[in-house]
Image: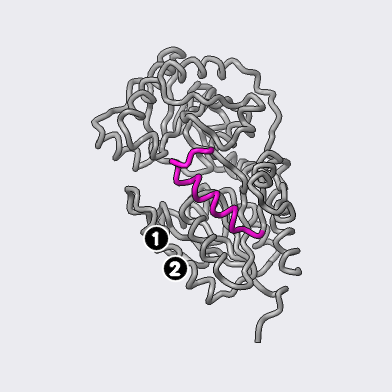
């Protein structure tokens, strides 16, 4: 006998730490209210043991299903997505959820969306819907477009994202502006970070520093892109006589070696850090330089000026409020925009909502399930 819709579970699918972070408020709410749910962790980027510590530090429940379908590197997105799709589908058939939630734009999102969309009676919800860089060379752009057009619930973080979805012909009844769950995550997790993390591990008390991240394929896979970015960062550090802390991704280490490049003077590499450590470093940085979409948002919310090391952004709101500048990869532009951003007043408005996005998302899904 088919179960009543009210008792059907909500599945939460993710595979990378940024996804976990942005879904943390949703997971905490589902867990706290004892709503029937389960989590599928594809293991796209990290080992199970490393992520056990990550969940513990964020005080989140452990995933119910751990797939460990790690990316093998290179550009074999079809193979990677296909393996995840097969495993996610198997679990969804066994668990019979009423709704599946995915977040963002990774291969885990694409696989989760495809699996849910092809199962009868399962509603798909895309958290952070409507973001566009308009750069089809980015694999993430393809993933987010496909997920949006398959979804039954599109949770847009901003009014601009909602307009993008409507312009693409998506039914307005499917779209809800919720705010961005990163606001929820920062509010909840900064309290944990201030209890657990001491900045003295990286910088002396009162010491000034810039913070950078660099990991996107279009930046680190090609010498013609990576070399000028590194030169621009060298000039920034020298001009301000300020070290640039760089929690360096293992993949970036490998690419530097492969391309015969080294980090210039002024850039201080440090071991990869957890989310709590990273948001503490963000909070106290003088300037952030990054190619990460999530970091653009976090810097904006924390009121730390940001220079984006890309030619496009799917977070235009950060530029519109004056929190972010798009520098591209040319050294002169990176230095010029660093000078501009370091001088701005940190009084811009937060365009990403009030920190109640997770509750709006859960309420909408439950309404759709008849709960």
Labelled disc at residue 87: 2
Residue 16 visible (yes or no):
yes
Q: Which secondary structure, mark 2? A: helix
Is residue 155 a member of the stretch shown in magenta? no
Q: Which secondary structure, mark 1? A: loop
Quadrant the C terminus occupies: bottom right
Residue found at x 70% / y 75%: 5
Gap between marks 2 and 1, in whole Å?
Answer: 9 Å
Residue 184 visible (yes or no):
no
Tell me residue 87's x, y (percent). 44, 68
Q: Tell me where the magenta segment starts and ends, as one range.
A: 134-152
Vertical relation: 224 (above or below) 187: above
Tell me residue 127's x, y (percent). 62, 52
Residue found at x 70% / y 52%: 175
Of 134 and 58, the residue lying toward us: 134
Is residue 159 toward the left or the right of residue 59 in the image?
right
Is residue 13 toward the left or the right of residue 217 in the image?
right
Q: Which residue sits furthest bottom? A: 1
Is residue 211 toward the left or the right of residue 353 in the image?
left
In contact (CB < 8 Å): disc 2 and disc 1: yes
Of 138 and 72, the residue lying toward us: 138
Label whose residue precedes the other's in the sequence (2 or 1): 1
Tell me residue 226's x, y (percent). 35, 29
Of 70 and 90, the residue lying toward us: 90
Q: Residues within 10 Å of mark 2 (few under 14, many from 20)?
A: some
Vertical relation: 133 (above or below) 224: below
Residue that mark 1 sits on: 69
Tell me residue 347's x, y (percent). 69, 23
Quadrant the N terminus occupies: bottom right
Q: Main secondary structure of the magenta part?
A: helix
């Amino acid at each position: 006998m088919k179960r009543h819709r009210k008792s059907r579970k909500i599945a939460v699918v993710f595979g990378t730490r940024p996804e976990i972070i942005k879904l943390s408020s949703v997971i905490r709410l589902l867990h706290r209210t004892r709503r029937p749910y389960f989590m599928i962790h594809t293991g796209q980027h990290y080992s199970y043991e490393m992520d056990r510590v990550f969940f513990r530090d964020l005080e989140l429940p452990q995933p119910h299903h751990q797939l460990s379908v790690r990316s093998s590197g290179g550009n074999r997105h079809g193979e990677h997505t296909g393996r995840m799709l097969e495993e996610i589908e198997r679990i969804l058939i066994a668990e019979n959820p009423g709704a599946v939630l995915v977040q963002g734009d990774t291969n885990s999102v694409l696989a989760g969306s495809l699996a849910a969309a092809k199962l009868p009676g399962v509603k798909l919800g895309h958290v952070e819907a409507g973001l566009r860089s308009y750069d089809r060379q980015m694999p993430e752009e393809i993933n987010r477009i496909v997920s949006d057009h398959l979804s039954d619930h599109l949770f847009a973080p901003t009014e601009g994202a909602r307009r993008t979805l409507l312009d693409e012909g998506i039914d307005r009844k499917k779209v809800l502006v919720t705010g961005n769950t990163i606001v929820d995550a920062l509010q909840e997790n900064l309290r944990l970070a201030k209890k657990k993390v001491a900045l003295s591990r990286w910088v002396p008390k009162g010491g000034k520093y810039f913070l950078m991240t660099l990991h996107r394929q279009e930046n680190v896979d090609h010498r013609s892109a990576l070399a000028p970015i590194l030169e621009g960062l060298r000039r920034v550090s020298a001009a301000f006589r300020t070290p640039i802390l760089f929690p360096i991704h293992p993949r970036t280490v490998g690419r530097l070696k492969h391309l015969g490049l080294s980090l210039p003077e002024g850039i201080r590499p440090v071991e990869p850090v957890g989310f709590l450590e990273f948001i503490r470093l963000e909070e106290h940085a003088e300037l952030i330089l990054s190619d990460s979409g999530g970091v653009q948002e976090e810097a904006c919310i924390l009121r730390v000026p940001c220079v984006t090391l890309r030619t496009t952004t799917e977070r235009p709101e950060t530029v519109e409020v004056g929190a972010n500048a798009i520098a591209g990869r040319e050294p002169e532009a990176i230095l010029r925009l660093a000078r501009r951003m370091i001088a701005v007043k940190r009084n811009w408005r937060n365009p990403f909502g009030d920190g109640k996005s997770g509750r709006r998302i859960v309420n909408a899904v439950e309404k759709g399930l008849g709960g």
